[in-house]
Amino acid sequence: MGSMKTAALISGGVDSAVAVHLLKEQGITPDLFYIKIGNGPQGEWDCKAEEDWEMATAVARRYGCKLKLIDLQKEYWDEVVGYIVDRLRKGLTPNSDVMCNKYIKFGCFEEREGHNYDRIATGHYAQTETDEAGRVWLTTAPDPIKDQTDFLAQLDGFSVRKLIFPIGGLMKDEVRKIAQAAHLAPAKRKDSQGICFLGKISFSELARKYLGEKEGLVVEQETGNIIGKHKGYWFYTIGQRKGLGFGGGPWYVVRKDIKRNIIYVSRGFETKAAYGKAFRIEMPHFITYNPYEADGDYRVTFKVRHTPEFTPGRLLVRGGKYELHSDELIQGIAPGQFAVLYDEQAHRCLGSGEIGLLPPAKIQ
């Protein structure tokens, strides 16, 4: 064990600090890496990032670890922001957290530094297990609210084999207790919201900067009535109900016509149009191994957004095409977001793919 070289990714938050603490308790002194993504191509530090770096420095000093800053701003701006703008242009809802993990936190990091290490520790709430055949699987954390396997579902088997998750088996309050008992600097810090840090920039600002504005109509799905105008379909996501600014609502975005730049909305909170049961999985990506290669009808659980609940359903596989049929109606199925696949027990995270629409006739 001792001869294995361990790196740990540290963010300045409580989770990665406790991960380092637990490694030290096992007699492992990891080399720490802080990934700087920054807020723009020029990458000015903002006050949160400065505080993160201070916290990371405090943890490194406390445990006698080397700490290195890895500047991946350019890569982030090219890969992740490029991906976001491309998806918005196509009328899809991007998922920057998943792609940031895939390209930056694990992809670019592996190329720069990770390849020198046998294992890479992170403060994610996730676990791994090895089966009889020696394959390593990504598995869910016991804390359903914190489980982050959905953010890791685009990683490959190679990354997962190297990863260790020291806090993956703990509940969040246990992690906080360890941090407080050990008097770790980040113990009192609030959790960050997104895992990936676009700084203060929102999707709509990126859309405005790269795609501009283009006026179009807002149409009520059920009646065909024009109820207003919008400034470009890329500012809206399916299932959205906040910030629409049309009277007589509440309104939900239920559909987008990209060619004609029309946004379709439906009124009310429980509107049927905002719910669906079935969708395609485009470009399915399996982490370790694809257990659904053969045509068939498989019982699975899945998530279409970062929630504590796993939704049960059936995965229909026909000639390499994948369709998910949920057991229950789900709200806001947004093309471009990731559907994350789990086994029926919601134990192994098998992989993910982008949500694609079914032809209208197929939706029950």
Image (spheres, rainbow, N blue to C red):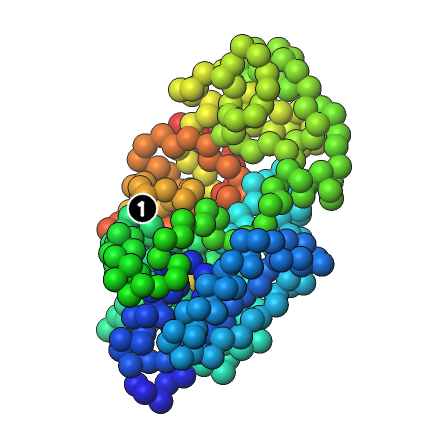
Q: Quadrant of the N terminus?
A: bottom left
Q: Quadrant of the C terminus?
A: top left
Residue 183 at x, y = what percent? 31, 63
Q: Nearer the viewer, residue 318 or 5?
A: 5
Which residue is pictured at 40% across the width and 83% down the height? 5
Judging by the rendered image, the residue that carries numbered circle 1 is 145
- Residue 229 placement, left or right of 187: right
Residue 23 at x, y = what percent? 32, 74
Q: Nearer the viewer, residue 156 or 185?
A: 185
Residue 266, placed above or below residue 167: above
Residue 225 at x, y = what percent? 62, 11
Residue 198 at x, y = what percent? 58, 50
- Residue 198 placement, left or right of 313: right
How many C-alpha atoms fall within 10 Å of the one at disc 1: few (<14), some, or many (≥20)? Answer: some
Which residue is pictured at 26% across the width and 78% down the height? 26
Q: Nearer the viewer, residue 44 or 121?
A: 44
